[in-house]
Image (cartoon, rainbow, N blue to C red):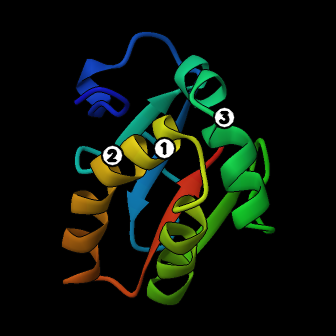
Amino acid sequence: MKYFCKPDERRGTCYYEFQRGGFNEEFWLEDSLLIGDGIWYDSGLEDFFFEAVPDLELYGTAEIDEEMWRNILEKAKDSEETVKEALEELDEWVKDNFKENNTFTIAGL
């Protein structure tokens, strides 16, 4: 993966974590996807997600349902190429998540 990694591949602790389902007060779950803060900022995902997900907080959590995810993908059509690429990479994980869960969680730093 170019933008995201699994918890066992992380180096350090400055990551946004994409968790399946709702947040359960735990971090670095085996089936989560992570994105390092450097990639998050440099790719344009930071500005994009904070605009697309009003409840997202730097150090908090936000739950995303299927309708919100569709809106995020729609907004991405007018975004920079790196944002589109990163969301395409994430989309496979998201689709798999929605087979079993109504939401996924983005946990901030």
Q: Does dot 3 land on a helix, a strand or a loop?
A: loop
- Farthest residue toward the top? 11
Horizontal arrangement in the rendering, residue 56 relative to residue 23 (left or right) = right
Question: Measuring 41% from the left and 57% from the top, which residue is drawn there?
Answer: 19
Mark nearer the viewer, 2 or 3 = 3
Q: Does dot 2 land on a helix, a strand or a loop?
A: loop
Question: Measuring 57% from the left and 41% from the top, which residue is drawn there?
Answer: 80
* Among numbered discs 2 and 3, the one appearing first in the sequence: 2
Q: Is residue 8 above or below residue 73?
A: above
Horizontal arrangement in the rendering, residue 1 relative to residue 76 (left or right) = left
42, 97: nearer the viewer: 42
Say which quarter of the image contains residue 100. Answer: bottom left
* Among numbered discs 1 and 3, the one appearing first in the sequence: 1
Residue at mark 3: 109
Residue at mark 1: 17
The image's mark for residue 106 is: none
Residue 53 in the image, given as x and y percentages of width and height:
71, 66
Residue at mark 2: 29
56, 47: nearer the viewer: 47
